Amino acid sequence: DIAMAFDECIPYPADHDYAKRSTARTTRWAHRCQEARKAHDRQGMFGIVQGGMYKDLRKQSAEELVAMDFDGYSIGGLSVGEPHDLMNEILEYTTPLLPTNKARYLMGVGTADCLVEGVARGIDMFDCVYPTRVARNGMAMTWSGRLNIRNAQFAHDWGPLEEGCQCYTCKNYSRAYIR
């Protein structure tokens, strides 16, 4: 299991002064969490980079957390209402500030596009409800797009979800079975 250091997720928009105070608070909490963990527990712990949409604060937050030597690093405070292009700009700036030999986790993104864009920018982990939400509503995600597996046409379709796919699900279960 992985625990997360306490943080304050900065809303969007936020002025620089508020973001600076919030980021400092997150850093203090991260230090306290590391100290408590070292004294009592060896559970994995990630520090959470904050800083709002301000690159100077993101850089400061990342540098201070990396100096604390967490087991991995989360990028928080994105996907909180900012434009998608701004989220990607901040993600692209922040990710290289974190060690490549430790997990880099993007918190709270919600679509398949965000996952793909995160991986392209060096992100290793996500918490995203999108795949389970899609599946719960009878959809399967394929390379060709979403497939409404509840459609009657799939009731007796013994083919794989995705023709030519070699994943475990496509090799072992039919559309009819999954339906």
Image (cartoon, rainbow, N blue to C red):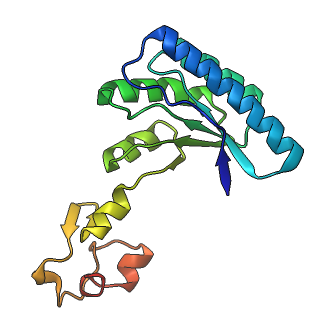
Q: Is residue 129 above or below residue 168?
A: above
Q: Nearer the viewer, residue 25 or 138?
A: 25
Residue 69 visible, this angle? no
What residue is drawn where x is 16% and y is 82%?
154
What residue is drawn where x is 35% and y is 77%?
170
Does residue 140 appear to the left or right of 48 in the view shown? left
Q: Is residue 178 above or below residue 131?
A: below
Picture coordinates of residue 144, whole percent (x, y) = 22, 61
| Residue 156 falls in image quadrant | bottom left
Q: Is residue 102 above or below residue 16?
A: below
What residue is drawn where x is 63% and y is 17%?
60
Does residue 21 appear to the left or right of 28 in the view shown? left
Q: Is residue 40 above or below residue 86?
A: below
What residue is drawn where x is 63% and y is 31%?
98
Picture coordinates of residue 2, whole percent (x, y) = 66, 52
Picture coordinates of residue 1, whole percent (x, y) = 67, 58
Picture coordinates of residue 135, whole percent (x, y) = 31, 68
Q: Quadrant of the C terminus?
A: bottom left
Does residue 69 appear to the left or right of 137 in the view shown? right
> Which residue is the extreme one toward the left?
153
Q: Nearer the viewer, residue 129 or 167?
A: 129
Residue 85 visible, this angle? yes
